[in-house]
Image: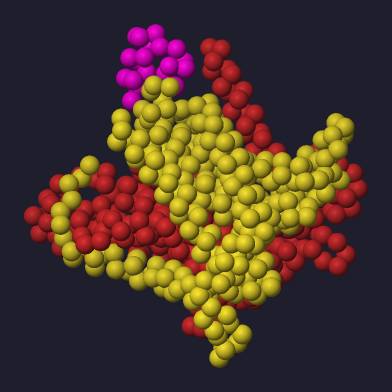
Amino acid sequence: MNMTKRKIVGITLYILFLLVPIYWLVNMSFKTNEEILGSLSLWPSNVTFDNYMVIFTDATWYSGYINSILYVSMNVVITLLVALPAAYAFSRYRFTGDKHLFFWLLTNRMAPPAVFLLPFFQLYSSVGLFDTHIAVALAHCLFNVPLAVWILEGFMSGVPREIDETAYIDGYSFPRFFVRIFLPMIRSGIGVTAFFAFMFSWVELLLARTLTSVDAKPIAAIMTRTVGATGVDWGVLAAAGVLTILPGLLVIWFVRNHVAKGFALGRV
Amino acid sequence: MIIKTDNNKAWWLVLPVFLLVAFSAIIPLMTVVNYSVQDIFDQNNAYFVGADWYREVLRDPRLHDSLLRQFIYSFSVLAIEIPLGIGVALMMPTKGRMGSLCLILLAIPLLIPWNVVGTIWQIFGRADIGLFGWTLNALGVDYNYASNTGDAWATVLLMDVWHWTSLVALLCYSGLRAIPEAFYQAAEIDRASKWAVFRYIQLPRLKSVLVIGILLRFMDSFMIYTEPFVLTGGGPGNSTTFLSQTLTKMAIGQFDLGPAAAFSLIYFLIVLLVSWLFFTTITYMDKAK
């Protein structure tokens, strides 16, 4: 089994390459600044939780996490609510302009966020939504909704049409059929879509930072505070970074069994 | 493939999406178009200038330089990540706990906020407090990403490979899982070599996921902003300043609305054009077969 051994070595090396930089961040987050700047050590000599305590006791710090989680959740809910019926329409019906609409939706995924910075800022300021969670959630729909429609359409096309027809013959109305029968059938697809929406909204910073100033400021933007007059507070910066990785780990744990199919966007 | 029926009532189902995207895409895009053809002094003084801004921007050396850098960057990213991603997918264990563990570990870099990715590599690459920079310098390599252009490029590329190869790998992995066992058995009976199995069984089945992977990686690497901004700030000099950063500097730093808007539209058109070219070529090649 020479081949298998080589494979195991290869994949182990690759995973090490992924994990070592993260380990370094975790390592730093448990050190004091003196130790970080003093000498290079592979693990902290005196484990300290001070860096984490700074974040958990200061409202300006932890509110950043709350803000990020709030707008990400809003975004996931909005994305799913509008994308589910649309994906059903695209997977089941031909209608005037359907192909154009689908392509136009996808082009929004291709739009560089930097292009939309200024107009977004002005648009949301003029309707009084600047510095609110919903503004960021709506802005992130720009790239999440097209992707969600695309993924869901793939999953829905895998469900045979006969199911719809049988349900209608049995006297189900469309909304009842959709919620009671159809949605449970594609629940792994919905989970995967929610995962992707979460992921792209959670990692995005440019739009989130531009559309907020105080009340809805995301954690990623607050992290820049660690650069002060006396230099960079490396320990707290590392601790804040580690804490931004945790929600992602939690979410991927829930969808772990569907990840493989999900990454093919339901299209294999 | 599902047989679709004609039904214009389906528009009611796509209406919410249409309205939402119209609000968050058409209105802002029209604002950009509006800026790109006017010279705006304040709210009451705006003059129509036609295509002047476009002419100015197209002659702007800043745009040429960052566009060239952007293309080199995006193509290097694709050239490294696509083969590496396929390789990693082929090496991944197929079943059991090890399989799901690998999936989760691989997905971790994808779930880290982009500025934190920048921060991780900023720390990791420093010669005084970072393992990577320290090790390289201890080995006698004079490495400093903040002052040496080559090192800065290498670090930005390495960071992107670290960050995004997993996406390609996971896409390919799911494509490989969809190949029926019977295909491999037939290959074994034919005594096909490893290469032949890859070339004639695995690679054709990977095509649809690879198209998605290449498109996503091209689009996203072409829009890259946060990671190099945090890592190098676009420097040393302008050596790692890519299109998004040039644009943001222009629009928010200097508030040159007209040129920035014209630049935006050209930028958007380039992404659309390259994606369309790629997609059309693939479909055309499919039909030719």
Q: Does the rendering let one see residue B41?
A: yes
- Chain in red? A
Quarter placement of the N terminus of chain B: top left
Q: Nearer the viewer, residue A145 or B32?
A: B32
- Identify the residue at image location x=30%, y=59%: A100
Q: Nearer the viewer, residue A11 or B39?
A: B39
Instruction: Characterize the magenta stretch by its predominant secondary structure.
Output: helix
Residue B55 vertical position relative to residue A267 in the rendered view, above or below: below
Is A2 left or right of B228, judged from the image as shown? left
Is B98 left or right of A173, judged from the image as shown? right
| Magenta stretch holds residue B193 | yes
Most extreme residue toward the bottom is: B44
- Return the x and y of residue A120 as percentages of the image width and height: 52, 73
- Return the x and y of residue A236 as percentages of the image width and height: 76, 58
| Magenta stretch holds residue A70 | no
Residue A16 vertical position relative to residue B221 in the rendered view, above or below: above
Chain B display color:
yellow
Q: Which residues are magenta?
A: B180-198
In the picture, residue B116 is in which quadrant? bottom right
- Return the x and y of residue A185 as percentages of the image width and height: 28, 49
In the picture, residue A264 is in which quadrant? top left
- Identify the residue at image location x=35%, y=71%: B19
Is A206 left or right of B136, judged from the image as shown? left
